[in-house]
Amino acid sequence: MSVEELKQIAKAMVAPGKGILAMDESHPTCGKRFKALGIPETEEMRQAYRDMLVTTEGLSDYISGAILFDETIHQTLLDGTPFPKYLSENGIIPGIKVDAGAHPLAGHDDEKVTEGLDGLRTRLNEYYDLGARFSKWRAVITIGDDIPSWACIEANAHALARYAKLSQEAGIVPIVEPEVLMDGTHSIERSYEVTELAQRITFQHLRNQGVLMEGMILKPSMVISGVSASSRADVETVARETVRCLMNTVPATVPGIAFLSGGQSDEEASSHLNAMHNLGIDLPWGLTFSYGRALQHASMTAWGGDSANVSAAQKVLLQRARSNGKAALGDYSADAEKAA
Ligand code: 5MM
């Protein structure tokens, strides 16, 4: 695949008013979400659930791409159509999570490094043949009294850069996801400090490995107060600080930035993105969403593992996708969503 094709795919992933559906939960994460709703944690249920998500009529009006898990990219829909084939025939670019999860970082209690580089070149070529045109790798950075350590930031940035270059070599657009967790009591100022550092060092490593800026997407967390902080910054402040951070770290040649929701409520995730588009700042890159929970949670709850609820659950998913699509244009209103 040519550089031009990588650029085109990256651009299509962040087309105006569209974002990415993160439906790449590993078995433990998917199991946790199913268990909380009393849904059996089986392969058949994961297939039925993800079939429900992707067959939502009109989804491609707001969703440009879907990130799949290894199991899903090898699975078929209930009617026998392979997931990647169905997605691309229905206007949604298939993507794939390629990391092997965050594991304890040696010598650094409470910190993690994402693994999965061994054999990655071969896996990427296989995923390309299965139809994947973008990939995703998530690094996890925790804020605490004495963390993150330099070792954690460096190790994760290096792995992200190696992964990104391997993806581009395989003709696949990498989504680079350095997630700074919301867990904790930290202030928004501390969130800014850590997020800016993580992004800055990640881009240093991306450049060191020769990653093509025009052929990648950044998937960051927002600059936001810790979920257990005694007082939490308001929507306007989160939007302003997040954009200020990105302006300081992300080259203007990167075509797009697609946020994770990270445990924010549905309304918060949409309101923050919406506010970023109403700051009166001319943004050099596309700015959109790549939400997992903030797109899926309400829909999964409505579905509850019962095929009788498919159409109700799809309605909920479409509403969340539409709201976030509007937020990506600065046109979202929480009140209008409630009324709908
Ligand atoms: C959908 O969840 C993704 C996979 O997580 P695990 O590897 O832990 O199972 C996750 O990477 C997700 O893509 C991002 O965190 C964004 O999801 P949220 O829910 O934070 O928007």
Image (cartoon, rainbow, N blue to C red):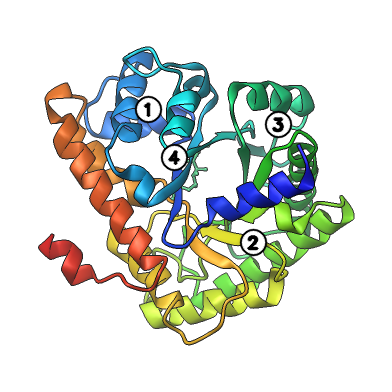
Closer to the chain start, of discs 3 and 2, is 3
Closer to the chain start, of discs 4 and 1, is 1
- Residue 149 drawn at (x, y percent): 73, 58
Task: Indicate left or right for 327 with 161 as reference.
Answer: left
Helix, strand or loop under label 4: loop
Task: Indicate left or right for 193 with 276 as reference.
Answer: right
Q: Looking at the picture, which amino acid does disc 2 mark?
A: Pro
Eye-nearest disc, 1 or 2:
2
Does residue 175 show up?
yes
Helix, strand or loop under label 2: loop
Closer to the chain start, of discs 4 and 3, is 4
Helix, strand or loop under label 1: helix
Residue that badge 1 annotates:
31
**Which class describes the residues within 10 Å of circle 4: few (<14), some (14-19), or many (20+)?**
some
Residue that badge 4 annotates:
91
- Residue 222 drawn at (x, y percent): 51, 66
Q: CA distance from mark 4 to mark 3?
A: 29 Å
Q: Is residue 78 above or below residue 185?
A: above
Quarter the N terminus occupies: top right
Circles 3 and 2 in contact, beta carbons < 8 Å: no
Judge: label 2 CB < 8 Å from ligand 1: no
State the image quarter where residue 97 is shown. top right
Closer to the chain start, of discs 1 and 2, is 1
The residue under the point 47% across, 51% down is 290
Residue that badge 2 annotates:
255
Q: Looking at the picture, which amino acid does disc 1 mark?
A: Gly
> In the image, which disc is placed on residue 116?
3
